[in-house]
C-alpha cells in the first residue's frame, strides 16, 4: 500500500478523519480477533502507523458516513458514539464488534 499517496488523497478530499477512524476500527477488530494470522503483526503495524500519521491532521469539524441525517439522528450519534469516533470527530455508532468477518 502506498501510504503517502493514501494520506495525501485523504487530506486533499478532507477525509482524514474518516480514514483514521476506519484504520482505528480495523486495528481494534484485529486486536480483539482470536484468528491466528501469519501477517497479523505486520497489518497491525501498518494500521497503527496510518492512525499516527493522520492523528496530527484531524479536522475539527464533525463528519459522518451518512449522506443525510436528521438532527435527532445526529444528536443520538453524538451521545452514543465510541471514544474512538469522538477522537476522530465522527458521528457514527460503528464499533469493532460490528465487524464479524475479521480475518
Image: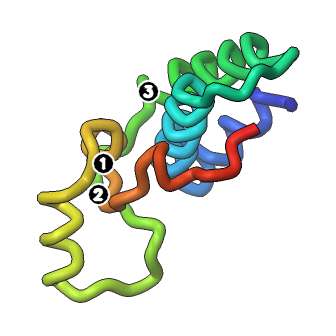
Q: CA distance from mark 3 to mark 2?
A: 15 Å
Q: CA distance from mark 1 to mark 3?
A: 11 Å
| Residue pointed to by mark 1 | 89
Q: Secondary structure at mark 1?
A: loop
Location of residue 86 in the rendering, given as x and y in whole percent from the top left corner? 26, 44
Instruction: Describe the colour scheme in one phrase.
Output: rainbow
Position of residue 95 relative to residue 71, above or below, is: above
Residue in the image at 12% along x and 58% along y: 79
Position of residue 95 relative to residue 1, above or below, is: below
Location of residue 97 in the rendering, given as x and y in whole percent from the top left corner? 47, 47
Q: Earlier in the sequence, mark 3 or mark 2?
A: 3
Label 1 packing within 10 angstroms: few (<14), some (14-19), many (20+): many
Q: Are marks 2 and 1 in contact (CB under 8 Å)?
A: yes
Q: Are marks 3 and 2 in contact (CB under 8 Å)?
A: no
Residue in the image at 79% along x and 36% along y: 5
Instruction: Name the residue nearer the viewer: 62 or 45.
Output: 45
| Residue pointed to by mark 2 | 62
Instruction: Name the residue nearer the viewer: 9 or 31.
Output: 31
Position of residue 39 relative to residue 60, above or below, is: above
Residue in the image at 46% along x and 82% along y: 67
Location of residue 69 in the rendering, given as x and y in whole percent from the top left corner? 31, 84
Disc number for residue 11: none
Residue in the image at 56% along x and 23% along y: 31
Position of residue 68 relative to residue 18, above or below, is: below
Q: Is residue 102 left or right of residue 97?
A: right
Location of residue 60 in the rendering, given as x and y in whole percent from the top left corner? 28, 45
| Residue pointed to by mark 3 | 55
Q: Earlier in the sequence, mark 1 or mark 3?
A: 3
Q: Earlier in the sequence, mark 2 or mark 1?
A: 2
Which quadrant of the figure has residue 29? top right
Amino acid at each position: 500500500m502506498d501510504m503517502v499517496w493514501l494520506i495525501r488523497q485523504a487530506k486533499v478530499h478532507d477525509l482524514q478523519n474518516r480514514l483514521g477512524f476506519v484504520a482505528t476500527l480495523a486495528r481494534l477488530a484485529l486486536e480483539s480477533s482470536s484468528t491466528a494470522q501469519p501477517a497479523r503483526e505486520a497489518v497491525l503495524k501498518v494500521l497503527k502507523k496510518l492512525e499516527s500519521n493522520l492523528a496530527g491532521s484531524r479536522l475539527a469539524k464533525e463528519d459522518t458516513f451518512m449522506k443525510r441525517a436528521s438532527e435527532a439522528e445526529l444528536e443520538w450519534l453524538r451521545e452514543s458514539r465510541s471514544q474512538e469516533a469522538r477522537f476522530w470527530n465522527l458521528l457514527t455508532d460503528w464499533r469493532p464488534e460490528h465487524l464479524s468477518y475479521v480475518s
